[in-house]
Amino acid sequence: MTAAQPDPTPTRRAPISGIAALLVGIAAFVFCWVPFLGLGLGAGSIVLGILSVRGGRARGAGIGGLAFGAVAAIPAVVMTIMFIAAFVIALPTGTGASRTAAPPSATASPAPSATSTPSPRTGAEEKAQYEARLKERQEAERAAREEDARKNGVELPDLSGLDGKTAQWRLEDLGLTVRFDGKSGTVLAPVNWTVIGSSPGAGKRAKLGSTVVLRMEKTAEMTPSPTPPGQ
């Protein structure tokens, strides 16, 4: 007996199943709007579908996967191209702004000089500034007088010849109090008496709130009292 001879027909490889092509094609159709991913799935389903049809196994599923891949490939290509274009357009303004900045022009106008002529002021502005400076100076002088009066007292003016009421107003305006000393009697109506001297005398200094004695001489009878200034 002769030994069994091996079958000379070579073993055929099993064709790639079309199920894989169909599943990848469905995935490509679902994710076709995702850049790069949809394009890769579409290309993969097309390749698997072609191999399945050529292998002769599950040709229906392979054709379905090939169809899904072909349909999904079109929007996938469009979305990928749009993504790349958007990235390229946004790149100069995002990370390379300094490279695209325009160089300074050689003919740019020079910066204004610090010694440029100021715009002329109107008469109203000049008047307002003058009045503001005058008010500040007056405030400073008044504050200086008040400070000097608190420290050194106030200088007494020469009140000789004034009636008693007017002299009293002037001294009270300086922050002093007044006491009358009548030469020939009690001073009841200061306006009817005339100042002939004071203690302390004119030119001397008296502390704020201190009393100045006015020496009086009677000059008139029953003269009505004058109205205080400002009333």
Image (cartoon, rainbow, N blue to C red):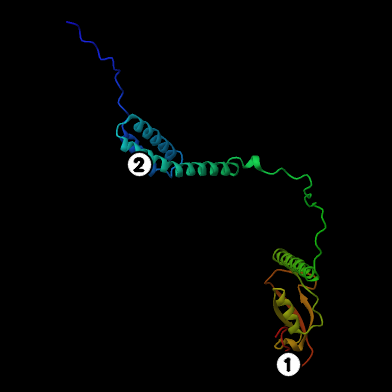
Q: Residue furthest front?
A: 1
Tell me where residue 61 sits by quadrant.
Answer: top left
Q: Which mark is residue 168?
A: none
Which residue is pictured at 80% across the width and 73% down the height? 202
Q: Residue furthest top?
A: 1
Q: Earlier in the sequence, mark 2 or mark 1?
A: 2
Residue under pointer 2: 26
**Element under label 2?**
helix
* Quadrant of the drawing holding the C terminus: bottom right
Residue beneath the point at 37% across and 39% down: 25
Q: In the displayed orientation, state which residue is furthest to the bottom.
A: 222
Q: Are marks 2 and 1 in contact (CB under 8 Å)?
A: no
Neighbour class for label 1 at 10 Å: few (<14), some, many (≥20)? few
Residue 174 percent coordinates (x, y): 72, 74
* Residue hosting label 1: 224
Camera-nearest label, 2 or 1: 2
Q: As displayed, is residue 227 above or below residue 70? A: below
Image position, residue 131 (x, y; %)? 77, 70
**Vertical order, 223 against 132 (above or below):** below
Residue type at the position of mark 2? Ile
Q: Residue at x 77, y 76 (%)?
A: 198
Relative depth, front residue between 129 and 45: 45
Q: Position of residue 192 (x, y in %)?
A: 76, 89
Q: Quadrant of residue 168?
A: bottom right
Please provide percent x and percent y for residue 161. Answer: 82, 82
Query: Tag 2: Cα neighbours inside 10 Å, few (<14), some, or many (≥20)?
Result: many
- Residue at image coords 73%, 76%: 171
